[in-house]
Each structure stands twice: as C-alpha cells, then as structure tokens.
Amino acid sequence: MPSRFLQKQRARYGQFGVASVLFAVLMFGGLYLADVGKRLQRNMELDHTAQRFLIAMLDGETAVRGYAITGNETFLEPYHTSFTRADDLLARILRMIPPKLGTHFDAAGLSRLVARRQETLARTIDLRQIGPEQAHAYISANEGKLIMDEIRRQVRDIEDAVEAENARLGQRLNFSLTFIAPAIALLTLVMLVLAVLQTRAMRRTLTIAQRAERQAERRGEELAALSEMADELHAASDRGETYRIISHHGARLLPDVTVELFVYNHSRDQLRRATSWGGGDALDTMFPPADCWAIRKGKPQINHVGRSVRCDHLPDTGVALCVPITARGQTVGMLAISGGEADSLEADGETRRTAVTLSEQVALALVNLDLRERLENQALRDTLTNLYNRRYLDEASERELNRADRLETALSIIAIDIDHFKRFNDQHGHAAGDEVLKRVSAYLMEGCRATDLVCRLGGEELLIMLPDTDLDGAIAMAEKLRDDVSHLRIRWHSGELPPVTVSMGVACYPHHARKFAVLHSLADEALYRAKQNGRNRVCVWTPRDRAGESRAAAVPIEAKAP
C-alpha cells in the first residue's frame, strides 16, 4: 500500500509538476506571445498611421496643384482638412514610436519639414491668385518637391524601422514556437489564432493602402487630363474644336459610361446635343429645359426606372445621371450619363464625382467661349445695328476681290444713305434716329442673300457688298431694297415716324474699277448724284468723256423724295 501510495503520490506530484511546468510554459509563452502581439499591433498601427499621414500630405498637395492648374477654388476644399488630418497623424506617430525606433529618424526635423511644406503650398495659392504664370514658376522651382521628397524619405525610414523590428520579433517568435510546440499543442493553436488575426489585420491594412493608392493615382490621372483639356480648350478657335476636345478628354475621364453634352441654343428655350461619347445618341437631339430636373433644381439628378420624379428627356430604361453645367451663377448646359454601375452614379460614387468635376471644367470653357464670341462680334459688328463695321469691311473686301479675280466673277457694291436723316434726329430726337437706323438695317439684312455683306460705315452711311453679282443684278437688288425701305413703317411711342427713304449708288468690279478703294469712291459719287437728283433713287456710276460733266446717271424711278 505504502509503495502504491507513494507511487500514486509520485505520479500526482509528477503530473502536478508537469502541469506546473506546462502551466508555467503556457503562462510564460502566453505572456511572451501577448507582448509580441502587442508590439506587432503597435507597429502595424504605426505603419498604417505613417501611410495615412503621407496620403494626407499628398491630398493637400494634389488640391493645391489642381487649383494652380485650373484656378478653380473648389479644388482647395480638401486642402485645409488634409493638413489638419496630417498634423493629427504626425502627432500620433510621434506618440506611438518607441524609444528603440525613435533613434532611426529626426522627429523634430519631420515636423519642421511638414511646416515648411505647408508654407510652400500656401505661397503657391497666394501666387495663383496673382496669376497662373507666377504660380507655375514657383512650382517649377521644385522647392516643394524637394521638401516632399525628404518627408517621403523620413516616412520610409519609419516604415523600414518598423519592418526591421517586425522581422526581429518574428525571429524570436519562431524560436519560442520551436521550444514550446513539443511541450504543448495549445500554444501552437494560440499562435495559429494570433497569426490568423494578424493576417486578417494586415490584409485589411493592405487593402486600405491599395485603395488609397488607386484613388491617388486616379486623382492624379484626372488632374493631368483636366490640365491638358484646359490648355487645349484655351487654344480652341471655335465651338467645333471645343466640343471635340471635350469629347476626347471626357472619354478618358469617364471611359465606361455613355455621356452626352447638351448646351442651350441662342434663344435659351431648348437644349441641343453638342457632342457625345461612349455610344451616345441615345437621347433626343433637342428638348426644352423644363424636361430636365437637374436643370430645374440646379444640382445633379439621379434617375431610377419607375420613380415618379424622372427627367422627361430620358428613356424609361436604366439608371441615368443628369449633371447641370453651371458657371458664374448661370446654367449653360447639362451632362447626361448612363450605363456603367448604378452605385457609381449615386451621391458618393466615383463616376458622379468625376462627372461633377468635368462639368465644372466644361462650364468654364463654355462661358469663356461665349465671352470670346461676344468680344469678337463686338470687334467686327456695329453695336447699334448689328451690321458689320468698317474694320470687317476692309478685311472682307480684300478677300472677296481676290476671290472674284481668281474666279473671274463680278462683284458689286451699293453705297446707301438714309435720306434726311438729320431731320429725324432734329425733329424726333436721337433715340428715334437710332430706331430708324436699326429698322432700316434689319430690312436690308433680311432682303440680302447669306453671302452678301451689309456694313455700317458711320452715321447713316451704309454699304452692301454683293459677291458674284454683275451690274444688272446689283441694280435690280438696289431697286428692290430701296422699294422695300420706302414701304417701311416705324411706330414710335404713341405715333408713327414719317416714311423713310434711302438713296443708293452702285459700282461694279471689274466693270468700273479693279481696286476696292476706287470702287467705293465711285459708288459714293453715284450716291451723291442720287441725292442731288432728288433722293429716294438708285444711281449707277458712269464715266463721262468731257470734263466737268456729271459722273453719275440716275436710274429712272417713279417714287420721288418726300
């Protein structure tokens, strides 16, 4: 009995000893593994925080570069939030770095670099408000790039130090597992569980980093495309080139959807399709603005099938997005987007965000194009009558004479003067005289062909250039226009102005002269003779052999001057 008892006791003591050793090993291993796991977790958070810090810096830099390129202040919206986030992340990094890792980089130096980079970006914004050239020159000096490169290097130092410490911890962990595994399988199971958890965490971190990297690359590509498009739009000479540039770069920015650009017509009562890409032409070419909810609300409208609120210009198939194109408080058009993933068209979707950015760039281009066309029109047209001015006549006359000479065709001109125009101004006021000028000019333009050129030279002096028109054709045209004007009735205030008549002088190339200045002078002489002979008539310039005789012959007409 005693021997069995002793044996049992010994067995129990042995089991207790084994259990104690196993427990001690388990406890030691658990504590050691917990410490290793905690350090790995800390290092993982430190690495992740460093990556988020660098991304925040890049977001702020990207926002400032976008503003420097386009001058659009909406690009600055993420600027302040990015650097506030960067400062918070940097403070977290400095708190999280253990003493061993702190020897691998200069914490104070990194803080100074961040402050310097913020100063250079603020300087870029100030210079861009002065002008794009100053901002681009400052950026080209590469001061900001050198600072950013040093920030990246220090962040890499942190990441390298974290990676090295993780490698050392891994080596110790492997050694411990080799020693503990034969003693207890539970330790291995614990390590496996920890490994699985760590792997999942690392995968999540990697996914976040990859997603952030893809977004940064996408934003960089968008900014490059927008910058290139802005340069080309600035150099575009007409609407055709402008729409082709928008279509080309729009296909780069929104490659997986169908996009159609609609702009207002001149009367602003219809939206017409200007261009499309990605398989467009699915919608009507023209529709009233009231059919689009995005135009009516002034903000993007998502259109779902079967919803009560859906744009009438869209077919009732599939999800579509309408984005208004607005600049300086005025809506100038609309982007209609369909196809692709429905989620990307929602409020936080990538396609929607890109479409809104594109609409802002297109809005600036269309507004600038309208402004340039108005300025060009003002430079070439008379502001009162909308007729071409003398400057345009000088350019067009040389071009048309060269064409007539090359094609061996005739070209005629009609010099026109409104009879007794001074009397209208004296008796009824200059406002009435202006109304007479506008109405007579409008009648002349309506009565001429699309190829004819009607100009106002000054005061009541007008001129019509008739390409491909011989002398007989010019006389017939002049008589018709004179007769039309004589029947014109102009209401003024509560009454009616006296009848308006015009006198005309006709000269023809090459019948009378081969130079436009001479031809114009001869038409003026014929006009002068028409006024001498009683006004309200057409005279054709005719040379005389004898000096001193009249140089113009009147075309017989029945109407007489009033």
Image (cartoon, rainbow, N blue to C red):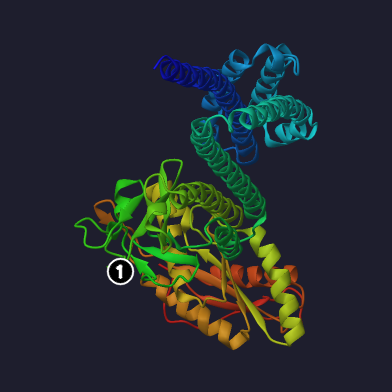
Crowding at dot 1, Cα within 10 Å, few <14 / some 14-19 / many 20+, comes out as some
Task: Give the quadrant of residue 55.
Answer: top right
Q: Residue at x 75, y 31 (%)?
A: 145
Q: Nearer the viewer, residue 395 or 314?
A: 314
Q: Nearer the viewer, residue 28 or 372?
A: 28
Q: Residue at x 28, y 51 (%)?
A: 493
Quadrant containing the C terminus is bottom left
Res 535 visible: no
Q: Residue at x 51, y 34 (%)?
A: 185
Farthest residue to the left: give it: 308
Res 194 visible: yes
Q: Nearer the viewer, residue 138 or 40?
A: 40
Residue ID for mark 1: 315
| Vertical relation: 462 (above or below) 90 | below
Which amino acid type is marked by label 1?
Answer: Pro
| Vertical relation: 39 (above or below) 381 | above
Task: Give the quadrant of residue 281.
Answer: bottom left
Q: Position of residue 455 (x, y in %)?
A: 57, 64
Q: Position of residue 26 (x, y in %)?
A: 51, 22
| Vertical relation: 160 (above or below) 486 | above
Q: Nearer the viewer, residue 6 or 369?
A: 6
Q: Give the left or right position of residue 62, taking residue 445 as reference.
A: right
Q: Position of residue 398 (x, y in %)?
A: 73, 70
Q: Position of residue 54 (x, y in %)?
A: 63, 30
Quadrant containing the N terminus is top left
